[in-house]
Amino acid sequence: MAFLAGQKVSAADLNALSPPTSVTAGSSGYANTTSTSYGTLSGDPGVAFTAPASGKVDVHIRAAMVGEAAGIGSQASFIVRTGSSVGSGTTVVAAADDNSIGMIGTDDVEAGQSTLVTGLTPGNSYNVQMVYKRRGASSAGGFARRRITVKPTF
């Protein structure tokens, strides 16, 4: 595709030159936490990506969750940071209950959700990582079959 001097170029035009691709990471192992604040666990899935021309990506998280005692729950969210090293860099999007999946009880629940992240600088490197916390009084919240996907959007 060739562009002419003075021609307006859209994000779709730029992405047509080098279409952005989705990136995914996962962990099938079981891990738990007793923390009531978001934090990392062993085997955390995370990915590095380059922001598309639109500056927007969909971040999709999925996990199987269980409370290890009655009245205990599990909650998972994500953090977006600058740079290509997963778990490092300046936080761009902090973990938040509004961007999370969660449950309370001892029945295994699988859940997933997507969040549109905007305002990224096109062409810059970012990384995203899942984080977790326990909901409820004591005991632990457990997580398995964790997966995170970043999909560029227009």
Image: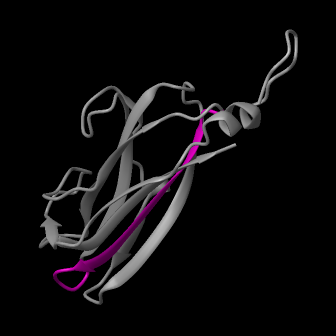
11 left or right of 30 in image: right
**Does the image show residue 129?**
no
**Where is residue 76 shown, x and y percent of the image?**
34, 61
Q: Residue at x 77, y 30 (%)?
A: 1
**Where is residue 92 shown, x and y percent of the image?**
43, 31
27 left or right of 121 in image: left
Q: Residue at x 69, y 30 (%)?
A: 14
Q: Is 81 in the magenta?
A: no
**Where is residue 72 shown, x and y percent of the image?**
24, 76
**Does the image show residue 34?**
yes
- Residue closest to the eye, 136 or 130: 130
Image quadrant occupied by the C terminus: top right
Give the tally of numbered discs.
0
**Where is residue 8 shown, x and y percent of the image?**
85, 20
Q: Which portion, as a residue range, is magenta?
A: 54-71
Q: What's the colour scheme?
A: one colour
- Residue closest to the eye, 99 or 154: 154
Q: Residue at x 38, y 80 (%)?
A: 110
Q: Is 59 in the magenta?
A: yes
Location of residue 100 by image quarter: bottom left
**Whether residue 68 is situated above or below residue 48 in the rendered picture:** below
Residue occupying the far bottom of the picture: 107
Q: What kind of secondary structure does the magenta stretch mostly adopt?
A: strand
Residue occupying the far top of the picture: 5
Q: Residue at x 54, y 59 (%)?
A: 114
**Whether residue 39 is situated above or below residue 15 in the rendered picture:** below
